[in-house]
């Protein structure tokens, strides 16, 4: 079995990452709630993660 490793490296960033996740979810039409969201589908979770990555790439490209 693989060990889960989805902890935040900088604990002070947790609040900002949670806000970022909620913004990305609302942009793709996924209703997340505070805390556990294990009841959403893999497709919905993937769309939130994909939107987060897309926004991070856009931010990086603008900084070049």
Image (tube, grey):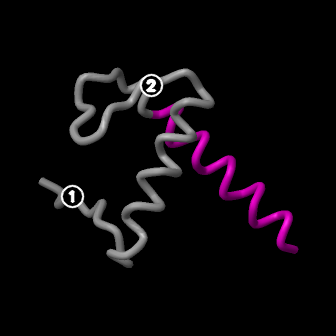
Asked which secondary structure carries label 1, the reply is loop
**Percent position of residue 27, x then y:** 62, 31
The region drawn magenta spans 46-64
Q: Residue 55: give x, y in percent of width and height.
A: 68, 50
Q: Main secondary structure of the magenta part?
A: helix
Q: Earlier in the sequence, mark 2 or mark 1?
A: 1
The residue that appears at 59% across and 26% down in the rendered structure is 28
Task: Please state if 50 lies on the left or on the right of 18 as rendered.
Answer: right
Circle 1 sits on which residue?
4
Is residue 57 found left or right of 8 in the rendered image? right
58 vs 9: above or below: above
Q: Dot 1 surroundings within 10 Å: few (below 14), some, or many (20 or more)? A: few
Vertical arrangement, residue 7 with respect to residue 10, above or below: above
Give me the disc on residue 27. none
Quadrant assignment, res 7: bottom left
**Residue 31 placed where, x, y %?**
42, 24
Q: Which mark is residue 44?
A: 2
**In the depicted structure, whether residue 61 falls above or below residue 29:** below
- Determine the image quadrant of residue 56: bottom right
Residue name at image x 47 percent, y 34 percent = 46
């Amino acid at each position: 079995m693989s060990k889960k490793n989805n902890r935040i490296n900088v604990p002070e960033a947790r609040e900002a990452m949670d806000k970022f996740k909620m913004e990305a979810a609302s942009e793709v039409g996924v209703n997340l709630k505070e805390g556990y969201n294990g009841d959403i589908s893999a497709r919905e979770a993937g769309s939130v993660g994909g939107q987060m990555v897309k926004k991070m790439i856009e931010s990086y490209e603008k900084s070049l």
